Amino acid sequence: MKYKACLFDLDGVLVDTAIYHFKAWRQLGLNFGYQLTEEQNEQLKGVSRVESLDRILAWAGVHASEEDKSKWLTEKNDHYLDLISSMNPNEILPGVSEFLDQLKQQGYLIALGSASKNAQIILEKTGLIKWFDAIIDGNHVSKSKPDPEVFLKGAQALGVAPEECIVFEDAQAGVEAAKKGGMKAIGIGEASVLFEADKVISTFINVKPDSLLTF
Ligand code: BG6
Ligand code: MG
């Protein structure tokens, strides 16, 4: 087998938490009279919490004190935690469980490569955790995607080389991170947005590793 491991982003790939991030950021923006758009939110996918706030403040033209920033980061995350508090296995995106089952049966190693510091709690609430051999999240990295650190650490944790890894990503920044890390990237979403990916699929429904993981 040419490829030994599959590295998954979490938000927007395995579960649809992207919508919860959007809701929480949009609500937060109202503190300083700013209405975040869906197009802007697209650029926040895969980007860390701190950097997301910095970008929103820049778009809004707001110069905030460190104290305000820290208060807003807490406010956003508290709202987000509230939104995800009732997550359950039903929120695993369609086709994902079947796809992960097949990967396991075929001997692939599976790791998480997420920018989120809330990844563990989401994996536990949804039951996704049972498929993962390694979890690298926002608590383990110092550089945000598009830096490849999160995926390189994932490969290292699994004991495989970057060239043996395939990354699944819904974010432009994540696809870029995978490519910079020397890995194949499969985009989940629209090809027009994820044009740097090696392949793009819109959903995992009826997707078979045998036919997808051929490069
Ligand atoms: C990424 C999301 O997975 O995690 C981003 O795509 C988010 O939108 C980032 O900002 C950090 O998440 P958290 O849960 O640590 O705020
Ligand atoms: Mg994502």
Image (spheres, rainbow, N blue to C red):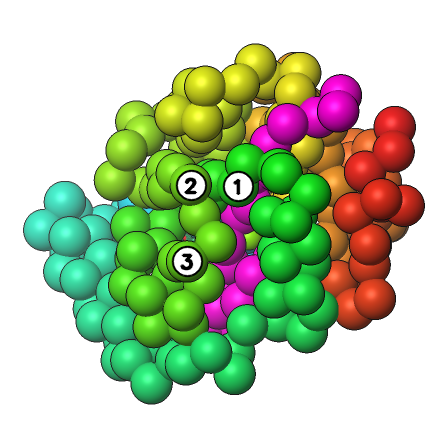
Q: Is residue 213 rendered to the left or right of residue 110?
A: right
Check contact, mark 3 vs mark 2: CB within 8 A: no
Between 27 and 155, the one lying in front of the other is 155
| Circle nearer the N terminus (3, 1) | 1
Q: Is residue 75 rendered to the left or right of residue 109?
A: left
Find disc 2 in the rendering and name its residue.
133
**Residue drawn at the location 32% of the way across and 66% of the way down:** 124
Q: Is residue 140 in view from this perspective? A: yes
Instruction: Confirm if mark 2 falls within 8 A of ligand 1.
Output: no
Find disc 3 in the rendering and name its residue.
130
Provide the residue span drawn in magenta.
Answer: 1-22
Percent coordinates x, y for residue 153 in the rendering? 41, 24
Q: Is residue 53 in view from this perspective? A: no
Q: Give the quadrant of residue 134.
A: top left
Check contact, mark 1 vs mark 2: CB within 8 A: yes
Give the Cα distance between marks 1 and 2: 5 Å
Percent coordinates x, y for residue 185 in the rendering? 72, 34
